[in-house]
Image (cartoon, rainbow, N blue to C red):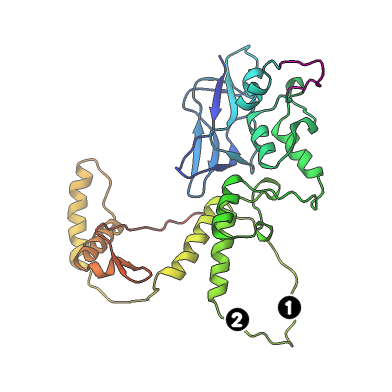
Amino acid sequence: MAKEVILPKFGFTLEESQIVEWLVGEGDTVAEGDPLVEVTTDKVNMEVEAPTGGIVAGIRAQAGEMVPVTAVIAYILQPGEPLPISNLQSPMLRQGSAQVSQSPNLPISQSPPAATPVAARMAAANQVDLAQVAGTGSGGKVTRQDVAAFLAQQPEDNGKLRATPAARRIAREQGVDLTAVSGTGPHHRIQQQDVLTYFETQQTLSATPPISQSPNLPISSLVHRIPFTPMRRTIARNLQRSMQEAPHITFQADMDMTALLALLGRVNKRVVAAGEKEVTITAVLTKAVAWALKQNPMLNAHLGDDEIWLHDDVHIGIAVALDD
């Protein structure tokens, strides 16, 4: 029996992930647990593993595309087994294909065209009538590529604002005009994070005094835009929030680390002898910072609107570098 490959929901609030790279291709044979595809969330890159052994088929999304979580992105088939055409329809479409009572005085409505789950969700998010989309899939089924091609043919000024339900909800709550927000989703669809980023940017601009500009200096109209990856967007948002909410202080001091390094050397001899990994200086410094925050609770605090919040727990973030 064909096994669906589901895009996992790696985070509680995660709505979609971006396909980074397929590690296998159509027709490849895989074993259970083999990595199939690498995806990226707003925090980390993850690999989706094969739920069972078999042959990879029916890949639904390509590298660089955003896919809703829990969507079917491929199938694992057994030798000689066909793709499960009936399973490619979304539950909504299967319900719509049920028998309709006929009346001699009323026209009979046609069943919605068959579509893959990703295509159905993509069409619903962009207010596209699937009956207007020509399907190129098996048996005339509408695929994600068909919906994308249909959207690409539509004029930009057709008056339809493309935004996810979550983006619309946040825009209503924060009083954001969606027409002013640039969408980073498929075909410029406005995502939830687009609204949050726009809202935070507007708050920063309103709190920043205007900078006088010399009328004699030419202003370049050349702009190079680099799309955000989900991870880079989260990093930028958090750095921007840090600049607004946290005091930034530079402090330098000289310390004699001789005794500490000697102690660390003795500890690591016992650790290595026990078959464990060595303790790094980063781990020691992290422990020292945590101890210092416990001894000085006013440092483990942040400023609220009219009061100071002291935290009982200590949370320390350690930055790591990536190639990009």
Q: 70 or 63: nearer the eye?
A: 70
Q: 232 or 281: nearer the eye?
A: 232
Say whether residue 125 is left or right of residue 256. Answer: right
Residue pointed to by mark 1: 219
Q: Report the Cα–Cα distance between label 2 and label 1.
A: 17 Å
Report which quarter residue 194 is drawn in: bottom right
Magenta segment's dominant SS is: loop
Q: Position of residue 22 (x, y in %)?
A: 60, 35
Does residue 84 show up magenta in the picture? Answer: no
Q: Position of residue 178 (x, y in %)?
A: 65, 57
Report which quarter residue 174 is drawn in: bottom right
Q: Is residue 274 above or below residue 283?
A: above
Residue displayed at 64% across by 40% down: 63
Total residue callouts? 2
Q: Would residue 48 be seen by someone viewing this image from the given angle? A: yes
> Type of residue at label 1?
Ile
Q: Would residue 324 be seen by someone viewing this image from the given angle? A: no
Q: Position of residue 131 (x, y in %)?
A: 77, 30
Check contact, mark 2 vs mark 1: CB within 8 A.
no
Instruction: Give the magenta range.
Output: 101-111
Residue displayed at 57% across by 17% down: 2
Instruction: Say whether disc 2 or disc 1 marks the residue closer to the N-terminus.
Output: 2
The quadrant in which the C terminus is found is bottom right
Is disc 1 surrounded by few (<14), some (14 to 19) or many (20+) residues within 10 Å? few
Does residue 109 show up magenta in the picture? Answer: yes
Say whether residue 281 is left or right of residue 112. Answer: left
> Type of residue at label 2?
Pro
Residue displayed at 67% across by 32% down: 120
Q: 25 or 86: nearer the eye?
A: 86
Say whether residue 147 is left or right of residue 293. Answer: right
Residue pointed to by mark 2: 210
Q: Position of residue 47 (x, y in %)?
A: 50, 37
